[in-house]
């Protein structure tokens, strides 16, 4: 099928889809999904469902993960990119490809283009994690860094496409790309035919569109829940408005879903097939990262953790739930920061301030008390110039490792009982009693 014919069919479907509830959403057919499933199997690794005893226990459901973070490119995006390229005419391929991406689609297009022997230019935001930039280059693509968010990079990519006659491959607002992503649903349902809920991360909406459409074609009873970061909930706001809207800004650590404006072409499918949207705070992603590392020994990037964090928001019991882990491309600096913040959130690391008399032996007394309470000292800050009152002239800030909130509270209480007037220091340096 030529790219020109494909695009005409897609545009016709979009116009019909935007016209109201009677929209004819026939472009994304079961035949196309079956064709795509055969195509993407050539380049994807098998990602069998992983049963989560931990999350099943705390939610009262049977929870499974679809680990697309284990794909060769570290994310599901290779599915849509490869299937899209398979639909292009030879002429379209000869012009070379261009796309914009915060990272995972970039790697998917770069890898798929390499396999097809096609030139690929990728425009990525300046804020893209280094690991994603370097891996995209490693597949032979030319990387251009532009803008601070995806939308700015995408606008520039469209300019370059027009200037150099490149064939543009949109990361989410393309029905063929969405069909390729939707092959995930085919695999989930084949492996777990009785699945009740599928949780899908949403950035621009391509993955959710493909998964939701195919799942409903195969079994209309399956509930599809899209999950967005609270600081980039463009799809949720669009569904509320009844049409695509653009957020004034986005603010989230889930860089792969930091999108201001969801897809126009895919929006009618989301309206029809997605049952609900859940939003989660960035702080929940930090906790979810630790949960996945500690309980499943898996590295999942922040966007992929959306569906993990959303499990605690589902008010259901005894259901079979699949959370799609969309990617695992997280650089080590981000990983280190997330771990540190996660430990602080869980009270596994905390800082407490005490005032000591300015005389020898006081530090040793505090150290002995902490040792007795089994608090592991990470750092000490000793300030002798906080006050001219020699009875409370020295501030000692102690950063400790604890077993959790209960242990932290026992340590603080022990300090209080010895008359040290402890104050827990918040992460931002603000005191709290």
Image (spheres, rainbow, N blue to C red):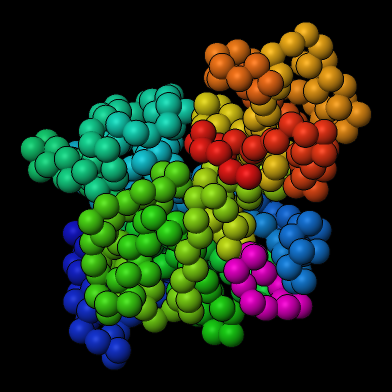
Determine whether 399 is above or below 201 in the image: above
Magenta region includes residue 210: no
Bounds of the magenta span? 311-322
Q: Where, by quadrant of the figure, is residue 218 drawn?
A: bottom right
Which residue is drawn at the image coordinates 35% and 66% (left, top)? 235
Residue 287 horizontal side relative to residue 200, left or right = right
Residue 223 horizontal side relative to residue 79, left or right = right
Which residue is drawn at the image coordinates 74% and 31% (left, top)? 420
Residue most extreme to the left: 163
The picture places residue 387, in percent across and down from the top left corner, at 56, 20
| Quadrant where the N terminus is found in the figure | bottom left
Q: Where, by quadrant of the figure, is residue 149 drawn?
A: top left
The picture places residue 77, in percent across and down from the top left corner, at 45, 48
Residue nearest the observer in this picture, 298 or 400:
400
Which residue is drawn at the image coordinates 77% and 16% (left, top)? 363
Number of marks in the image? 0
Residue nearest the observer in this picture, 313 or 94:
313
| Quadrant where the C terminus is found in the figure | top right
Which residue is drawn at the image coordinates 30% and 84% (left, top)? 24
Residue nearest the observer in this picture, 254 or 34:
254
């Amino acid at each position: 099928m030529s790219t020109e014919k494909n695009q005409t069919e897609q545009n016709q479907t979009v116009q019909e889809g935007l016209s109201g509830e009677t929209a004819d959403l026939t472009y994304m057919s079961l035949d196309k999904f079956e064709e795509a499933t055969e195509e993407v199997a050539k380049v994807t690794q098998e990602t069998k469902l992983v049963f989560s005893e931990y999350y099943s226990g705390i939610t009262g459901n049977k929870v499974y993960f679809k680990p697309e973070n284990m794909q060769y490119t570290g994310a599901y995006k290779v599915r849509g990119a490869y299937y899209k390229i398979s639909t292009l005419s030879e002429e379209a391929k000869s012009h070379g490809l261009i796309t914009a991406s915060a990272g995972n689609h970039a790697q998917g297009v770069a890898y798929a283009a390499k396999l097809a022997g096609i030139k690929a230019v990728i425009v990525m935001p300046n804020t893209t994690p280094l690991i994603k930039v370097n891996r995209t280059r490693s597949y032979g693509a030319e990387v251009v860094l532009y803008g601070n968010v995806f939308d700015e990079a995408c606008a520039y990519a469209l300019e370059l496409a027009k200037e150099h006659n490149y064939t543009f491959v949109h990361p989410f607002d393309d029905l063929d790309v969405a069909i390729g992503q939707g092959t995930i649903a085919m695999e989930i349902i084949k492996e777990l035919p009785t699945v009740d809920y599928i949780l899908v991360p949403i950035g621009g909406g391509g993955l959710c569109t493909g998964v939701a459409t195919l799942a409903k074609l195969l079994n209309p009873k399956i509930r599809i829940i899209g999950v967005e970061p609270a600081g980039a909930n463009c799809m949720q706001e669009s569904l509320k408005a009844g049409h695509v809207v653009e957020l004034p800004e986005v603010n989230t650590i889930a860089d792969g879903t930091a999108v201001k404006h969801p897809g126009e072409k895919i929006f009618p499918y989301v309206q029809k097939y997605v049952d609900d949207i859940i939003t989660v705070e960035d702080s929940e992603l930090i906790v979810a990262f630790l949960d996945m590392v500690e309980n499943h020994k898996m590295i999942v990037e922040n966007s992929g953790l959306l569906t993990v964090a959303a499990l605690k928001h589902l008010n259901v019991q005894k259901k079979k739930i699949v959370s799609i882990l969309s990617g695992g491309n997280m650089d080590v600096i981000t990983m280190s920061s997330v771990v540190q913040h996660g430990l602080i959130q869980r009270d596994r690391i905390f800082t407490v301030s005490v005032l000591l008399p300015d005389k020898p032996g006081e530090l040793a007394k505090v150290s002995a008390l902490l040792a007795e309470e089994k608090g592991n000292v990470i750092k000490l800050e000793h300030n002798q110039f906080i006050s001219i009152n020699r009875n409370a002239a020295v501030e000692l800030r102690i950063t400790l490792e604890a077993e959790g909130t209960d242990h932290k509270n026992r340590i603080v209480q022990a300090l209080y009982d010895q008359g040290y007037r402890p104050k827990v220091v918040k992460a931002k340096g603000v005191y709290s009693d």
